[in-house]
Image (spheres, helix red, strand yellow):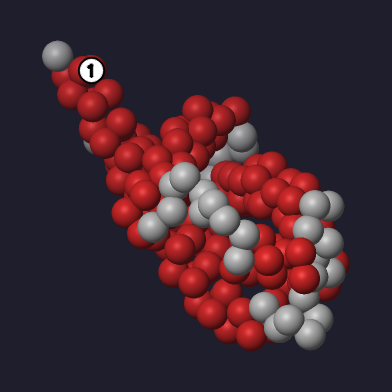
Amino acid sequence: MENMQHQQLTVLRTVIAGIIGLFGFLIVNMIGFRVADPILFDPNVQSPKLMAVWNKIEPLPPAHGLVATLSILVLIGIGRAFVYRWLAPSWPSGFAARAIRYWMLVWFLSYFFVEFSAPFTLFGEPVGFILIELVILGVAVLTEAFVVAGIMESSKAQAAKG
């Protein structure tokens, strides 16, 4: 019975870590892109194809709107926290060491891949803009990584004490 309660608390902690980590990511992401948007969406220097895809071409993606977008993002945040939970035991111990590995995994396999597979390859976005976006996304994911690792590793420290 006690093991089942511990398992439920661990799952709950993972879900909470994913949600809080996601909101940390979103806050940094929104601030970063709010600052960079005047540069990134300047029609004088941005790819016309990317501008058309972003602003003009119909139909809109099937999951558009705030509720749909946030629902999908919450699922992604929770999913990434479960990936952390699954992989962290194989990484060196320690909050920072695990957070950095999580950051590299998410940033490189998600954002680095996406930025070069769509905006650059398909839409012709200038490389300098891709680099700006990757820096913003890198800082946002680093925030998420430290939040998730902090929550998940604090539960392990508490378990070791008690």
Q: Is residue 97 visible from the viewing direction of this image? A: no
Q: Residues within 10 Å of mark 1 (few under 14, many from 20)?
A: few
Report the side of 89 relative to 43 (left or right): left
Asked where in the image residue 136 lies, by quadrant, the reply is: bottom right
Asked where in the image residue 159 lies, by quadrant, the reply is: top left
Q: Measuring 33% from the left and 40% from the top, which residue is drawn there?
A: 15
Quadrant holding the C terminus: top left
Q: Which residue is mark 1?
A: 3
Residue 72 picture location, percent across and down: 41, 45
Q: Measuring 55% from the left and 63% from the top, which residue is drawn there?
A: 140
Look at the picture and state if 5 lies above or below 43: above
Look at the picture and state if 128 lies above or below 35: above
Look at the picture and state if 56 lies above or below 88: below
Q: 4 and 35: which one is in front?
A: 35
Q: 98 and 116: which one is in front?
A: 116
Look at the picture and state if 77 lies above or below 25: above
Report the side of 5 relative to 45 (left or right): left
Residue 86 picture location, percent across and down: 50, 28
Residue 130 picture location, percent across and down: 77, 65
Q: Measuring 85% from the left and 67% from the top, which residue is drawn there?
A: 127
Quadrant holding the N terminus: top left
Residue type highlighted by circle 1: Asn
Q: Is residue 35 visible from the viewing direction of this image? A: yes
Q: 3 and 110: which one is in front?
A: 110
Q: Measuring 73% from the left and 72% from the top, which residue is drawn there?
A: 132
Report the side of 116 relative to 61 (left or right): right
